[in-house]
Image (cartoon, rainbow, N blue to C red):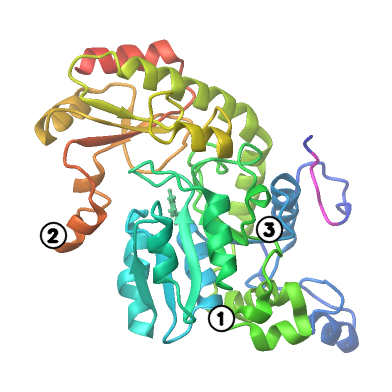
Amino acid sequence: MLKRIQKQKDNHGSIAVPIYEGAAFEFDSAEEMEEAFLGKSGKHTYSRISNPTVEAFELNIQQISGAKNVLAVSSGMAAISNVFMTLASSGSNIVTSPHLFGNTFSLFLFTLKAFGVEVRFCNLLDEEEVKSRIDDKTCAVFTEIITNPHMEVVDLQSLASIAHSKNVPFIVDSTIVPWPEFCASNFDIDIEVVSSTKYLSGGGTTIGGLILDHENFDWSKSLRLQELAKSKGPKAFIHKLRAEIIRNTGAYMSPHTAYMQNLGLETLSLRFQKSSGTCKQLAEYLETVPGIVSVNYTGLVDNPFYTISRKQFGDRPGSMLTFCMKDKEACYAFINKLKIIKRATNLFDNCSLIIHPLSTIYGPLADEYKRMVDVPDNLLRLSVGLEDFEELKNDILQAL
Ligand SMILES: *Cc1c(COP(=O)(O)O)cnc(C)c1O
């Protein structure tokens, strides 16, 4: 399954993808230079635009995800912001749920608002409501495939159909379940964004993000890209993103990050088998523990999203779960006593991590916005790593 792709054989025959850490690339002639700058030869010119190490990572991601085009960027947030800088414009709107990763919520509500882009929060589980919020100024319908930390799962195929029936692209953040467990092209998804900081970095080593274009949308219907679609057709989105947006925002991935995450990619499926298996075991175990009020993991048979989660993600819906204790004080007392599980943000490190989301990720939000995101005060989020089940179980037991 694993192929270690490099666009061309390394000069020295290095088997590992070398780190090309340089800023610029030299040419033999002015003519060759012109060709490269016009994008005609595929040669690299400057590492803000493209780089051999990053390109190798992009090609590997393309292979495992099935996407037609992949762009690697400096963080998950850079992936999301660059997608919307490509698609949104003043006067346009984004239809999404308020149940979002904290910075995505803040990007939509505060940052993009200053540029005249409106966010329309609605309940994405209510299809009639979604239909009623989309209009001819909607530039995208956006969702996380399993919302963090609410753990809601929308029917992706239905939402894609609704968006497409209104000529709107459907964009998902698929950070929570890695490929090939999750395959966006099965659900008619147009653009996928991923925080590669999580599963891919293989041990929380580096911050990175990915934009995956499935070339599924007819861009002649997009407000912003219809002109470009006349010449570029299905490549209109990736062309705008690569030739203009990423160069101007300067958010391209660094070669060192690409090296680390390429390495992470090679062990992704092994690590995910272990961590997601332990996560499910822990979810089942936590349901039986006194002091734990409720457990939220969509792989549990009694979870309200079990059926749709199984259909979309199989029996391994990620290595993250949330659970509720009596109150915030009980949560704090519990996490302060943990010895193996680390008190930290981030997801899918090789070490298990725990956090009280409301007081940290959502902590800086004013009360009115905290009410919108609706994260309970007695909720903890656990990201499960590669430790053995027994070890984690015993740590939890001694902390209770
Ligand atoms: C972490 C995360 C992000 C942001 O990614 P960064 O790499 O930290 O910028 C976006 N979406 C989800 C679902 C995440 O978990």
Mark earlier in primary sequence (1, 2)? 1
Which residue was labeled with disc 1? 248
Looking at the image, can residue 114 be seen? Answer: yes
What is the distance, in whole Å, between disc 1 and disc 2 at their CAs? Answer: 35 Å
Which residue was labeled with disc 2? 367
The secondary structure making up most of the magenta span is loop
**Residue neighbourhood size for the residue with mark 2, other residues' Cα within 10 Å, grouped as few (<14), some (14–19), many (≥20):** few
Please tell me which residue lies in front, 121 or 71: 121
Mark 1 near ligand 1 (CB under 8 Å)? no
Q: Quadrant of residue 246?
A: bottom right
Residue 64 - label: none
Q: Quadrant of residue 376?
A: top left
Secondary structure under the numbered disc 2 in the rendered image: helix
**Residue neighbourhood size for the residue with mark 3, other residues' Cα within 10 Å, grouped as few (<14), some (14–19), many (≥20):** many
The residue at the point 54 percent across, 69 percent down is: 83
What is the distance, in whole Å, between disc 3 and disc 1 at their CAs? Answer: 18 Å
Q: Nearer the viewer, mark 3 or mark 2?
A: 2
The relative height of residue 252 versus residue 90 in the rendered view (above or below) is above
Give x and y (percent) for residue 140.
50, 70
The residue at the point 49 percent across, 52 percent down is: 207
Please state the extent of the stretch shown in magenta in the rendering: 3-7
Secondary structure under the numbered disc 3 in the rendered image: helix
The relative height of residue 388 versus residue 310 in the rendered view (above or below) is above
Mark earlier in primary sequence (3, 1)? 3
Which residue was labeled with disc 3? 54
Q: Quadrant of residue 243?
A: bottom right
Give x and y (percent) for residue 18.
74, 50
Q: Nearer the viewer, mark 1 or mark 2?
A: 2
Looking at the image, can residue 174 be seen? Answer: no
Name the residue type under label 1: Asn
The relative height of residue 49 versus residue 384 in the rendered view (above or below) is below
The relative height of residue 44 versus residue 248 in the rendered view (above or below) is above
